Image (tube, rainbow, N blue to C red):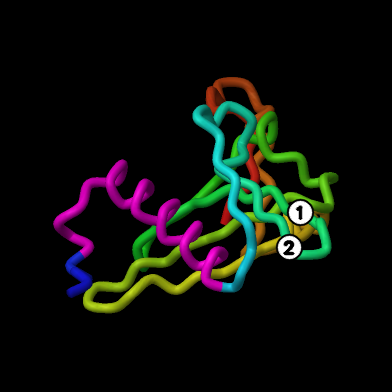
Amino acid sequence: MTNTDWSRLNSLQLGRYAEYFGKMEFASYGLEVYTSEVDDHGVDFIVKDKKGRFCEIQVKSKTEKGYVFMQKSKFDINNKNLYLALLIFRQGKIPDIFLIPSEVWKVPNEVFVDRKYDKPGQKSAPEWGG
């Protein structure tokens, strides 16, 4: 009895749902999932496979018409073990999940963007987005 009326959730609820859904997806493949109580370093959870390899996962959610971003200070694109788990919510369907290596932002393009916000009057912190 899965509810797929995503319009009933506010952005905080949708983000929390995405994080839990992502954890369960990784667990369904037999990976160990480790969570932290505080997400202050841009990592929502860590997954480890049976060979002891691990990945750090940052989860972001969006509806069909959303923009997601990670502050550069919390999302190190030089960390080869860091991934973005992007969940896209479409009304009436379970979310689509995309696992994106952080390194794709090393060569920004029209999908994986680099927002520097370094011009006078720009107040946002620098971010990676898409």
Q: CA distance from mark 1 to mark 2?
A: 6 Å
Q: Is residue 71 above or below residue 130?
A: above
For badge 2, the amino acid type reads Asp
Q: Residue at x 28, y 46 (%)?
A: 13
Q: Residue at x 56, y 65 (%)?
A: 26
Q: Which is nearer the N-term, disc 1 or disc 2?
A: 2
Which image quadrant is residue 122 in?
top right
Q: Is residue 2 above or below residue 114?
A: below
Point out residue 33 in the picture as x, y percentages from the top left corner.
Answer: 59, 53
Q: Which residues are magenta?
A: 6-28
Q: Is residue 123 above or below residue 115?
A: above
Q: Are marks 1 and 2 in contact (CB under 8 Å)?
A: yes
- Circle 1 SS class: strand
Left or right: 52 with respect to 111?
Answer: right
Point out residue 87 in the picture as x, y percentages from the top left corner.
Answer: 46, 63
For badge 1, the amino acid type reads Phe
Q: Is residue 7 on the magenta stretch?
A: yes
- Circle 2 SS class: loop
Point out residue 124 in the picture as x, y percentages from the top left corner.
Answer: 54, 28
The one of 79 and 46 positioned closer to us in this rendering? 46
Residue identified by numbered label 1:
54
Q: Is residue 47 on the magenta stretch?
A: no
The one of 31 and 127 positioned closer to us in this rendering? 31
The one of 130 and 20 positioned closer to us in this rendering? 20
Point out residue 16 in the picture as x, y percentages from the top left corner.
Answer: 36, 47
| Dot 2 crowding, Cα within 10 Å, few <14, some 14–19, many 20+ | some
Residue identified by numbered label 2:
49
